[in-house]
Amino acid sequence: MGTANNRIAHMPFRLNAAKIKRAQKLMQAGTETETIEQALDAVITEHERNEAAREANERFIKSGVVIRDVYGTLEKIDGTGR
């Protein structure tokens, strides 16, 4: 986490101490700062995963692939049976 583009900013926050301690325990973080860093990393990673999944879904839909309901369990969308 110590790349040239990253800088440490001292910021005054008022945070719920019980939430920090709970997260610290769950994440097995050594310090409150480490806890917050891990939580921020997790949020960023989750956003990137969601974005990648959304983009993949859009590519899949645009590909024109036809999905057949071989078991007859999918909901009919357009009334034509497709």
Image (tube, rainbow, N blue to C red):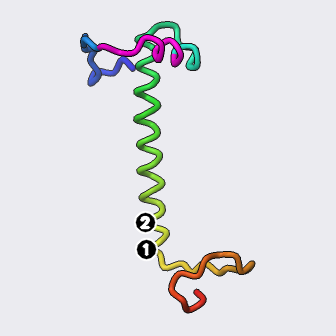
Kindly identify the amino acid type of the residue bearing the numbered disc 2. Glu
Judged from this view, the residue extending furthest toward the top is 31
- Kind of residue indicated by mark 1: Lys
Which type of secondary structure does the marked residue at label 1 adopt? Answer: helix
Q: Which one is in front, 52 or 18?
A: 18
Quarter that holds the C terminus: bottom right
- Residue at x-position 58% and y-position 19%: 26
Q: Which residue: 44% across, 52% down?
A: 52
Mark number displayed over residue 58: 2
Q: In this view, does 5 lie above or below 64?
A: above
Q: Give the range drawn in magenta.
A: 14-23
The spot of residue 24 in percent (x, y) is 52, 14
Question: What percent of the width, then of the height, locates residue 17?
Answer: 43, 11
Q: Marks 2 and 1: CB-CB under 8 Å?
A: yes
Q: Is residue 38 found inside the magenta-colored segment of the image? A: no
Tag shown at residue 62: 1
Q: Dividing the picture into quarters, in which one does residue 6 lie?
A: top left
